[in-house]
Amino acid sequence: MIAEDTDENGTLLQKPIEIAGRAGVHLGTLMTALGSLSRLGYISFERGGYWQPSKITLLPIASKARSAA
């Protein structure tokens, strides 16, 4: 879902609570998954401020996999 919502640069600016709601998962579950994807090198994840969106960027390996699918 995140990959589908990114812009042409592979970036998504959105509040995690909104992503979790659309995905139908608990916010804690989403944050754990984003942390894991970041550690594995699939995404870059920058948390936003309290009322600001977070920035999720697909890294090149993930972008190539997305375009091959």
Image (cartoon, rainbow, N blue to C red):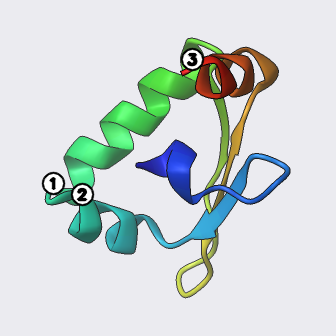
Three-letter residue code for mark 2: Ala
**Residue at the (73%, 14%) spot, across then down:** 61
Q: Mark 3 points at which residue?
A: 39
Residue 53 position in % (x across, y down): 60, 74
Residue 67 position in % (x across, y down): 68, 27
Describe the element under mark 1 as helix, strand or loop: loop
- Left or right position of 12 against 27: right
Residue 5 position in % (x across, y down): 55, 59
Mark found first going from the N terminus, 3 or 1? 1
Q: Mark 1 points at which residue?
A: 25
**Residue at the (74%, 60%) spot, across then down:** 7
Disc number placed over residue 35 in the picture, else none: none
Can you tell which of label 1 and label 2 is closer to the viewer?
2
Three-letter residue code for mark 3: Arg
In the rendered structure, are the residues bearing label 1 and label 2 in contact, judged by CB atoms less than 8 Å apart?
A: yes
Mark found first going from the N terminus, 3 or 2? 2
Q: Mark 2 points at which residue?
A: 23
